[in-house]
Image (cartoon, rainbow, N blue to C red):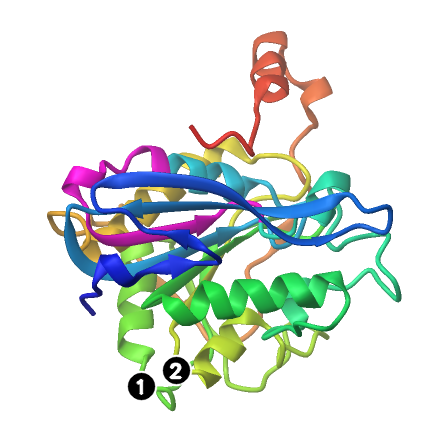
Amino acid sequence: MANQMANQEFLGVKAERNAVVRQRVPVGQLGDGTPVTLPVIVIGGKDDGPTIYLQSGIHGDEVTGIEVLRGILTQVNPSELRGTIVAVPTANPPAFISKTRGFSLEERGPFDMNRVFPGSAHGVLSERIAHALFHEFVMKADFTVDFHSALAGCNIYPFIYVDPDDNESGTLDVRVSMARAFGTELVYHKKRGSKLGTSVMTGALSTQGDLHKKPVLMAELGEAQRITWDMVGRSVDGGLNMLRELGMLAGKPVATKEPLRNVTSGLPAMIPPAPKSSALPNAARRLVNRSRPTSLY
């Protein structure tokens, strides 16, 4: 999986050896003409190697993954990296503005963007963004990790999907090894074609990635609409473990402290969320209010 960095370009953003490149790239506009841009970060390593795509914020109210992604990127030194990391920390900017799952003002919407992949270059805004994410990032990477959180009003026990749980695409071994490297106690093995609750997943990123023989993992972490801080550190460690598993960082993945359990039916429990920042002690409330999850460095 060694790629020639000189030839790598993601939505017009070129990888540079031993450097970090940050750009905002236009992908559409709102009804009043306001531009919609994707924040793209590309970390080019000192040496050629695999390419991993890290994505968060595809649902606008799921901000814990954005903070996790920021934590991973800030701990990677390009001079110690083999290969390329490309990241889109806020993959659905219109929904992020309103902290809603989908873009609330969209025509015929809101849509769940994780149900419309691989997207459409001529569809509504959510479909066009999904098309850019899929074709400009997922299809150009050797591996994709997509960070999510629970539905609004809930918290969720951290777990990672292996979806689908078969090897028709020839990618099962690397998906399982990467899931174990991430280190959550639970790994959810989802059967091909099965629903997620009542939701049909044929347009999910993991499903479409598999159909195109591109390995994708989805991680579920914490609650919606605010950062679940006790999930951030362990998830950053898990992300760095994945880079080690791919041989992009030196060393072997650090063993998880908790045993891994495979789950093949049902979902990890959703529980009521912790108190909002207004119910926290003053010091903790100041920390929460100062958080800027779109500030990457």
User: Does residue 53 appear in the picture of this structure?
Assistant: yes
**Which of label 2 and label 1 is nearer to you?**
2
The reply, left or right, for residue 91 in relation to residue 277 is left
* Residue type highlighted by circle 2: Lys
Nearer to me, 132 or 245: 132
Residue 138 lies, in percent from the top left, at 44, 67
Evaluate if marks 2 and 1 touch, with contact meaning CB atoms under 8 Å apart: yes
Q: Is residue 52 above or below residue 116?
A: above
Q: Which quadrant would the N terminus be assigned to in this image?
A: bottom left
Give the magenta part as a residue range.
73-90
Q: Earlier in the sequence, mark 2 or mark 1?
A: 1
Magenta residue check for 150: no
Q: Which quadrant would the C terminus be assigned to in this image?
A: top left
Residue marked by disc 1: 170
Nearer to me, 234 or 95: 95
Residue marked by disc 2: 213
